[in-house]
Amino acid sequence: MCQSNAFLIRKNGTEEMIMEDVSLITPQEDGSLELTGLFGDRLTLNASIKEMDLLKHKIIIQEN
């Protein structure tokens, strides 16, 4: 499998992995992002995508 890991950059500049094996990112009408993992786990964040490195399987999300 080639799913990516999602990392959140918080407003204070710290970065943390928030989800492994992300299989779907869905933008919501309110501007938030819904991340869905390989096994159906979901996480909704008030954030935007900063960078997606598909070769390194890394998604960088910036907290709004």
Image (cartoon, grey):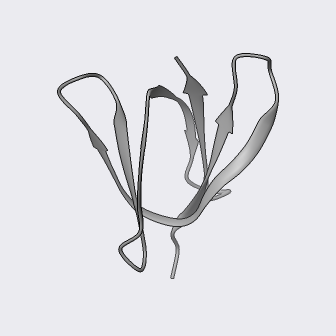
| 53 to the left or right of 30 | right
| Quadrant position of residue 15 | top right
| 29 to the left or right of 48 | left
| 26 to the left or right of 53 | left
List x then y, in percent, for residue 16: 76, 44
- The correct choice, above or below, for 14 with respect to 23 in the image is above
List x then y, in percent, for residue 47: 48, 27
List x then y, in percent, for residue 61: 57, 34
Which residue occupies 79% across, 17% down?
12
- The correct choice, above or below, for 27 with respect to 13 in the image is below
* Number of numbered tags placed on the structure image: 0
| Residue placed furthest toward the left | 29
Which residue occupies 51% across, 69% down?
3
Which residue occupies 52% across, 17% down?
64
Task: Please name whichever residue, 16 or 55, is drawn nearer the observer in this view of the structure.
Answer: 16
| Quadrant position of residue 39 | bottom left
Which residue occupies 70% across, 17% down?
11
| 60 to the left or right of 17 | left
